[in-house]
Image (cartoon, helix red, strand yellow):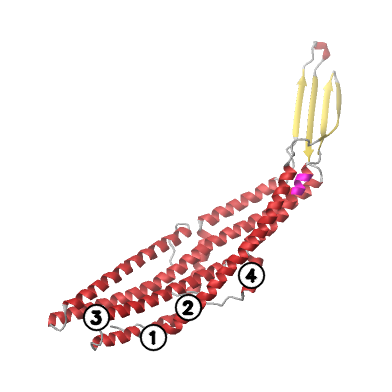
Amino acid sequence: MKKRSITLLLTCLVLIPLTAQTDLEQVLRKIEINNKSIQAQQQSLEARKMAFKSDMRLYNPNVEYDFLQGQPFSAGNQTDILVNQVFDFPTTYSRKKELASGQTTQAELDYLSGRQGILLEAQQTMLSLIYRYKLQQQIAERKSATEKLLQDFEKKLETGDGNILDVNKAKLQLIEINKDYQLNTSQINQLIQNLNGLNGGLEIEFTANQYPEDISLPAFEELYEELKSLDPMWRFYELESNTAKKQVEVMKAMALPKLEAGYRYQGILGATFQGFHVGTTIPLWENKYRVRQKEAELSFAGLQWIDYQNERYYALKQRYEQYEKLSSTLQEYREVLGTLNSIAYLDKALALGHISTIEYFLESNYFYMAYTNYLQTENEYYQVKAELLRFRL
């Protein structure tokens, strides 16, 4: 059986990560262009911007025409024409403009957060694929080695130097390895399909089997400050309170009288009258309770902002502690596995007859299980790190 070079596999983590990082970033850029959810959110963003702008426009002008036929006939006919425009109280327009500006910024931040969520899902899918590719490589090596071992046992059995028990043990071992191989292949196919789905249904190739360059994270407090400056939802909720204040101001301005101005023409009995038309609307009923409603929403926005700060701080704290523990465990795995040649020792011991076939498989399975746990820990490490740095996407 060929010696399994754990040292070589671990060295690849240092030699290939730049290529892996490039592949990952290229796929993310393609998904950002082709993803249907991102495209839909872009269209929704534009629609929301137009809606905010439409709230600032003037009311539609009003045109009235009346023709009144007189009775008796000698009374003559009367013609009335009225063209007028209704205006909100002047201060209302500046309030609406400020509100629309804040709402537009919030809509953009909401879009950026949704985009980051999709890109994070794509990134984590690719990290899972890297794990599955590395696991597949390990299983394929075990499969090849066990097949060779089975052939050796069968040859020895034919020449009378072996026994059927060793052959059967090797066959059973191979069945288990083939099962793991097929299950892992299925997982790879599912992840690829998920990645294609994120790419708008277009097939995308991602074959990297090494993780991106491993850059240490800054201290927690420094990372938290970076999150506060870059996280779109942090700014979204921060602006929510200000937007709620602007809505209260708009509602108060809307409670002021509306003004109308225009032109009036009247013709009767051969005489014409024309001049300016002015009027006002006193909002006694239309905006009743709306100011109170917006004030309640302002109070809610303030509490929601505080809640989001607490949630993000403690969620980040928990993830950061998990990252530190995984980093420590991963380093221990690498130090130990990088110096082991367990399979080579087992091959030699089996060839010399120092251990039985069952002992060989038990010991080799224990070693491979430890290596699989290492791969799982490595993947968890990069998955957690991706979550911590989501706001950089």
Q: Amino acid at mark 3?
A: Thr
Q: Which residues are magenta?
A: 248-252
Q: Which residue is mark 4?
A: 224
Relative to the observer, which residue lies in front, 24 or 352? 352
Q: Which picture quadrant has residue 342?
A: bottom left
- Within-10-Å neighbours for mark 1: few <14, some 14–19, many 20+: some
Seen at 41% across and 87% down, the residue is 339
Q: Is residue 46 left or right of residue 15?
A: right
Q: Which residue is mark 1?
A: 340
Element at label 4? helix
C-alpha gap between disc 4 and disc 1: 39 Å
N-terminal of the pair, mark 3 or mark 4, is 4
Q: Amino acid at mark 4?
A: Tyr
Asked if residue 15 can be seen in this view, the reply is no
Give the number of the disc on residue 330.
Answer: 2
Q: Amino acid at mark 2?
A: Leu
Q: Are the residues flagged by discs 3 and 4 in contact, CB closer than 8 Å?
A: no
Please provide percent x and percent y for residue 113.
59, 60
Q: Are the residues flagged by discs 3 and 1 in contact, CB closer than 8 Å?
A: no
Please provide percent x and percent y for residue 154.
18, 78
C-alpha gap between disc 2 and disc 4: 24 Å
C-alpha gap between disc 3 and disc 4: 54 Å
Q: Are the residues flagged by discs 2 and 4 in contact, CB closer than 8 Å?
A: no
Element at label 2? helix
Q: Which residue is mark 3?
A: 357
